[in-house]
Image (tube, rainbow, N blue to C red):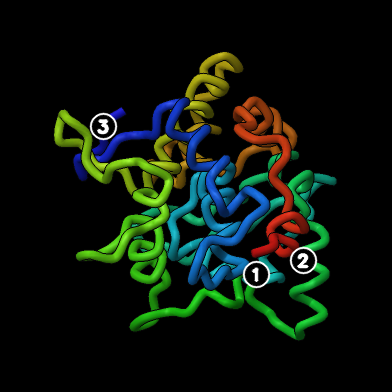
Amino acid sequence: MKSHLGRRAFSAMELHILFNGYIYGDEKQPREQPKHWHFWLPLLAYYCGAYSDEIGSLQLADIVTQGSIKGFNFNTHGKIQPRFVPIHTALWQAGLEQYIHYVESQNQQRLLFDLPSKSGRYSEKVRIWFSGEGERLGYLQKCGLPNIDQQGLKTAISSLRLNFEQQIRIAAIQRANKPAFHYLMGLKDDALTQPQERLQLKKIIAPIRVINSHVHWQRFIERHS
């Protein structure tokens, strides 16, 4: 899938490589300085379809329960609409509840509290870590993946939103619920982005493919040298 920015979604093989890379393995890399957000941000981008700035801005107070469905309230991106995105089962299985308790124990209000901002934005720090800059390799390169493919299309952290888009589009079509697709993507179309029934949103999120069922935050923090 090509976007207007010349970006594409990751292939199934690329997703497998990313979510089986060293961040999700058992050993730290030489000179690596692991941060909690290194683990969580790609997962949240893939399973929620949110931008880096939205994810970086998430407060614990943005994790809410609506109609027995727990999800994230995204409301900080000027280009797209605020929306409620149900939390995919894979995020709970990856230790999200334990991590939330940890954030609370640190008296922090922001979910990814160790992700710093630059000029009020989080995306720049994420971009450099994920895609690299100059001679500095990013997570992509360390996983053996290029920034630009042979067709000249780029992959970046925002490519995970395209993977989310591909999968929920199919699920929404199967349920004959195009408005739910527009709502979950935050698309600005007043006729199609009205608030949706939360259970239906959860059912559209549920089929998103789990890439690595062994991913867990506890495993991340227990990695050894």
The residue under label 1 is which amino acid type? Leu
Q: In this view, does 223 lie to the left or right of 30?
A: right
| Residue at mark 1 to residue at mark 3: CA–CA distance | 31 Å
> Where is mark 2, residue-wise?
100
Disc 3 marks a residue whose amino acid type is: Lys
Between the residue at mark 1 and the residue at mark 2, the CA separation in whole angstroms equals: 7 Å
Dot 3 crowding, Cα within 10 Å, few <14, some 14–19, many 20+: few
User: Is residue 4 visible in the rendered structure shown here?
Assistant: no
Observer-nearest residue: 29 or 161? 29
Q: Earlier in the sequence, mark 1 or mark 2?
A: 2
Tell me if 94 is positioned left or right of 129 in this view. right
Given residues 172 and 55, the one toward you in this image is 55
Q: Image quadrant of residue 174? A: top right
Q: Which residue is denoted by mark 3 in the rendering?
A: 2
Q: Which residue corresponds to the image point at 23% horizontal and 64% vertical from the top-left?
A: 135
Q: In this view, does 123 lie above or below 18?
A: below
Q: Quick one: label 2, few (<14), some, or many (20+) residues within 10 Å?
A: some
Is there CB contact under 8 Å for labels 1 and 2?
yes
Whole-percent x and y of residue 82? 51, 56
- Secondary element type, mark 2: helix
Crowd class of label 1 (few under 14; some 14 to 19; many from 20; radius 10 Å): many
Q: Where is residue 32 in the image (x, y as percent from the top left)?
A: 51, 68
Q: Which mark is residue 153?
A: none
Q: Where is residue 140 in the image (x, y as percent from the top left)?
A: 38, 49
Q: Residue beneath label 1, please? A: 111
Q: Which of marks 3 and 2 is nearer the N terminus?
A: 3
Q: Which residue is drawn at 39% across and 53% down?
A: 80
